[in-house]
Image (tube, helix red, strand yellow):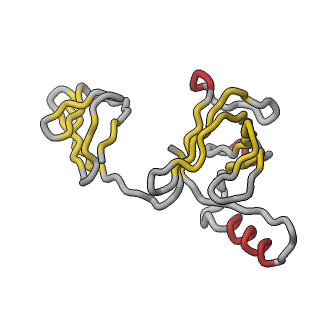
Amino acid sequence: SSIVLSFNIFGDTVFAGDTELISGVTPVDATKPVTLTVKNGKSENEYTLVVRNTGLPVVRITTPMGRTVQSKEIWMEGASLRIENPDGTVDYDGGMSIKGRGNSTWGYPKKPYALKLDKKSSVLGMPKHKRWILLANWKDRTLLRNDAAFWLSRQTGLPYTVRGQFCVGG
């Protein structure tokens, strides 16, 4: 019911009601919309924060020392993956390696990644496997093309078909 916001501002202070917020420290009640006020000298700007459950799993990736994945060829080892179901339960929490993937898609702002789990695991109800892919779908404005292709593939009845699950990053 409460969240801790991390923020960088172009201002002096941020308030939620009468409470001054400290980035990464002060909890905010997120059960209803919150009005945030950013004060900068004599000016003030107000923003409304509304927290909603998307109904999608949340994927959280932590890399060693917070480094950015920059290579499609070299695995970054020592990373971790945590996947939380929409109800807040943990689907997966463990170690992994990560690298970029794709050819032209690697050049877009939203990056696709290849994940190699430390051990074979089932993720989001899919069969156990060690290697997983996070597709960015940056060029697909509908966000449905890959999902439709996966569905069509499953209809063929072949022994192996690609599976997928929409998710959000956290």
34 to 149, vertically: above or below: above
Foreground pick, 7 / 10: 7
1 vs 120, left or right, is: left
Q: Residue furthest top?
A: 65
Residue 32 coordinates in the image, percent (x, y): 24, 54
Residue depicted at x 31% and y 28% = 25
Residue drawn where x is 72% and y is 28% of the image: 77
Vertical comparison of 96 with 160: above or below: above
Please state the horizontal and vertical placement of residue 4, each as a whole percent of the image. 33, 36
Residue found at x 61% / y 63%: 143
Q: Please state the horizontal and vertical placement of residue 117, each as a whole percent of the image.
A: 72, 40
Count of marks overlaid on the render = 0
Residue 100 visible, this angle = no
Out of 5 and 128, give the one closest to the viewer: 128
Q: Does residue 6 appear in this view?
A: yes
Q: Is residue 31 left or right of residue 128?
A: left
Q: Quadrant of residue 130?
A: top right
Residue 11 lies, in percent from the top left, at: 27, 28
Q: Residue furthest right?
A: 158
